[in-house]
Image (cartoon, rainbow, N blue to C red):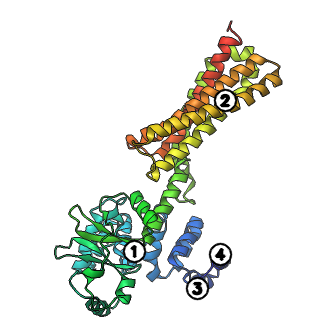
């Protein structure tokens, strides 16, 4: 296995050969890499260089590489491939990988692909495709080995020798009855260390919990993390075994979830191509910028309500950003905490009220602490005790509202089916800006310049 430093050096050498037009040397380096590393390399290249590099990839690696690149890069690579090339590239792919790739393939290629498959593999693929991509059914691989509970371990060993090979990432065999209902698992370690005369029923692990086919991929990842799983069975509502999920697929889910959370905060999609055409990238980002403009206009409108007050006391304009910024940061802390809690299943209707009270208490204490600090600084800075009191009260009010908004926004968005990671930060920023400005300027109007 190569170290990350060795891989980095190979990638640098590839880029040097590609830039120098030394395509044969570049091809040799490229095809020594793992398909995932080739996919990473393709995603880092500008469009013109990517097309050249893709032509250098050996066709037997092409299908695996396509399963690793993000959706937009994959679509770009596929559109330049001939139908026979696409069919050839998909040969040998695992059923779950093929199911992920299928939506991006042209209809003629899909038809040809199904015609080229034998009946068993066609049925396997169709069984995966009937489930949504973000469920255990969409994630599972139907390539499983099942055994009956009434046979001996010696019989199982002979069966595996006749079978010739095991599916990748196999750490256990699944035990089912004659109706294919899941009964438990037989660990490979038990198979090779226990008395061969024992029956499967005598050594199988009946405590293994199967994953419902309708479970979300996020729930699947959580189960693998909690139970330290390498593979897990997937069953339907009647406990019939449908397939299995392996740790390599779960790692992809975890990575995608992390990418989604990070990119969504900026209104971006984790599947976007970093080197997409300028116009396309501009269009995508323009939508999010437009949303933020609307929220900024709302905050500006609130400020405009107190323009007379600001004219009479210029210090307010200097101090306004402090109030909004403190509320925004405090709210973001709570928002991030609750959003992560929802993603990990740690926040639910059962404990939401307790968490809300706790965050309000934290907001109140931090409000008192920093209101004192900011109030004293403002009073000393502008030699105005009243100004210090007003900004202190505004900070307390905004931090309380920030805590309330940060805790409740993700819960409300999730209830209505929206993504808290995508919309939460925009809503929160709007609330803290509006409340902060309104509280600060409103209090100033009442107590500092009453004639305004």
Kindly indicate whether the residue at mark 2 contacts the one at mark 3 (C-beta within 8 angstroms). no
Mark 3 or mark 2, earlier in chain: 3
Q: Give the number of the mark in front: 4 or 1.
A: 4
Kindly report which numbered mark, 1 or 2, lies closer to the viewer in this rendering. Answer: 2
Mark 2 and mark 1 in contact (Cβ < 8 Å)?
no
The picture places residue 230, in percent across and down from the top left corner, at 42, 73
Q: Earlier in the sequence, mark 1 or mark 2?
A: 1
Residue position for label 3 = 28
Rendered image quadrant of residue 305: top right
Query: x%, y% of residue 13?
Result: 67, 79
Q: Where is mark 4, residue-wise? A: 8
Callout 1 secondary element = loop
The residue labelled by disc 2 is 368
**To which residue does mark 1 refer?**
82
Q: Mark 3 and mark 1 in contact (Cβ < 8 Å)?
A: no
Real-space Cα distance between discs 1 and 3?
Answer: 24 Å
Q: Determine the CA span between mark 4 and mark 2.
A: 51 Å
Q: Is residue 199 above or below residue 241?
A: below
Mark 4 / mark 1, whichever is N-terminal: 4
């Amino acid at each position: 296995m190569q170290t990350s430093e060795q891989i980095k050096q190979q990638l640098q050498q590839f880029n040097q050969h590609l830039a120098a037009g030394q395509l044969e040397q570049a091809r040799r380096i490229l095809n020594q890499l793992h398909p995932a590393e080739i996919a990473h390399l393709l995603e880092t290249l500008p469009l013109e260089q990517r097309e050249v590099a893709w032509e250098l990839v050996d066709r037997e690696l092409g299908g695996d590489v396509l399963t690793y690149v993000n959706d937009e890069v994959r679509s770009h690579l596929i559109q330049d491939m001939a139908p026979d090339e696409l069919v050839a590239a998909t040969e040998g792919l695992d059923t779950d990988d093929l199911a992920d790739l299928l939506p991006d393939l042209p209809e003629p290629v899909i038809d040809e692909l199904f015609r080229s498959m034998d009946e068993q593999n066609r049925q396997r693929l169709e069984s995966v495709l009937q489930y949504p991509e973000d469920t255990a059914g969409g994630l599972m691989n139907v390539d499983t080995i099942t055994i009956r509970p009434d046979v001996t371990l010696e019989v199982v060993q002979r069966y595996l020798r006749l079978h010739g090979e095991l599916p990748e990432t196999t750490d256990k065999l699944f035990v089912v009855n004659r109706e294919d209902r899941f009964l438990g698992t037989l660990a490979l370690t038990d198979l090779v260390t226990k008395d061969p005369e024992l029956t499967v029923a005598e050594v199988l692990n009946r405590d293994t919990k199967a994953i419902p086919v309708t479970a979300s991929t996020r729930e699947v990842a959580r189960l693998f993390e909690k139970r330290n799983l390498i593979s897990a069975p997937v069953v339907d509502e009647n406990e019939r075994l449908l397939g299995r999920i392996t740790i390599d697929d779960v790692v992809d889910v975890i990575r995608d979830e992390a990418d989604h959370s990070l990119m969504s905060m900026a209104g971006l999609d984790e599947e976007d191509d970093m080197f997409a055409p300028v116009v396309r990238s501009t269009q995508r980002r323009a939508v999010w910028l437009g949303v933020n403009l609307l929220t900024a206009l709302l905050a500006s409108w609130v400020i405009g309500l107190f323009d007379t007050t600001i004219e009479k006391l210029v210090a307010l304009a200097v101090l306004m950003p402090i109030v909004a910024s403190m509320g925004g940061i405090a709210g973001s802390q709570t928002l991030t905490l609750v959003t992560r809690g929802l993603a990990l299943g740690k926040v639910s209707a059962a404990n939401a009220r307790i968490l809300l009270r706790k965050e309000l208490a934290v907001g109140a204490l931090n409000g008192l602490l920093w209101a004192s600090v900011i109030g004293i600084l403002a009073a000393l800075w502008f030699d105005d005790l009243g100004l210090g009191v007003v900004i202190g009260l505004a900070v307390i009010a905004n931090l309380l509202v920030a805590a309330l908004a940060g805790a409740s926004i993700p819960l409300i968005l999730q209830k209505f089916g929206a993504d808290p990671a995508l919309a939460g930060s925009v809503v929160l920023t709007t609330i803290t800006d509006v409340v902060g400005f309104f509280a600060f300027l409103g209090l100033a109007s009442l107590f500092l310049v009453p004639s305004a």
